[in-house]
Image: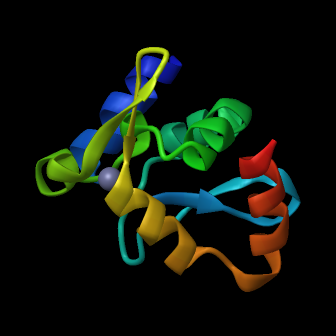
Amino acid sequence: MSLLELLQHIQRQRLILRYGRADRIVLWSPNRVVSRSTRQAIRDHAQTLRQMLSMHDVNVCPNASLHREEWRYAGQGRYVCGACERLQAWIMPRKREASYREQKAS
Ligand SMILES: [Zn+2]
């Protein structure tokens, strides 16, 4: 699955991603059935997804229709989601918060 296909799938299915242990990206979508190919694609594109999550890129926003009014232009052709920024802070495991802040600052 290409990154573009994965991002389209994430938005269609309203899947929420967050950081996991050991630089992994995990799904934060309790009680959702997610296909093996989707899980594999998330592993394949973990590095790019991490960057997108750290920037709150609108392409990993799980709910464009609900969050769109909080989207703002961040320069260089990128849009970020203010709602996802708050959501990520809330669902982030506490232990990961420090390294997340470091990555965001760099
Ligand atoms: Zn969002």
Residue 28 in sight here: no
Can you give x and y, in whole percent of width and height, for residue 1 in the image?
Answer: 51, 21
Tell me: 71 left or right of 69: right
When the figure is inspected, residue 20 is found, relative to residue 40, above or below; the finding is: below
Tell me: 71 left or right of 95: left
Can you give x and y, in whole percent of width and height, for residue 44 in the image?
Answer: 69, 31
| Residue at 62% from the left image edge and 74% from the top image edge | 92
| Residue at 51% from the left image edge and 17% from the top image edge | 2
For this rendering, which residue is in front, 30 or 53? 53
Quadrant in which residue 101 is drawn: bottom right
Residue 78 in sight here: yes
Can you give x and y, in whole percent of width and height, for residue 68 in the image?
Answer: 18, 46
Which of the image's four quarters has the C terminus? Answer: top right
Quadrant in which residue 41 is drawn: top right
| Residue at 46% from the left image edge and 22% from the top image edge | 75
When the figure is inspected, residue 96 is found, relative to residue 100, above or below; the finding is: below
Extreme-bottom residue of the structure: 94
| Residue at 84% from the left image edge and 63% from the top image edge | 99
Tell me: 70 left or right of 55: left
For this rendering, which residue is in front, 73 or 100? 73
Extreme-left residue of the structure: 65
Tell me: 59 left or right of 19: left
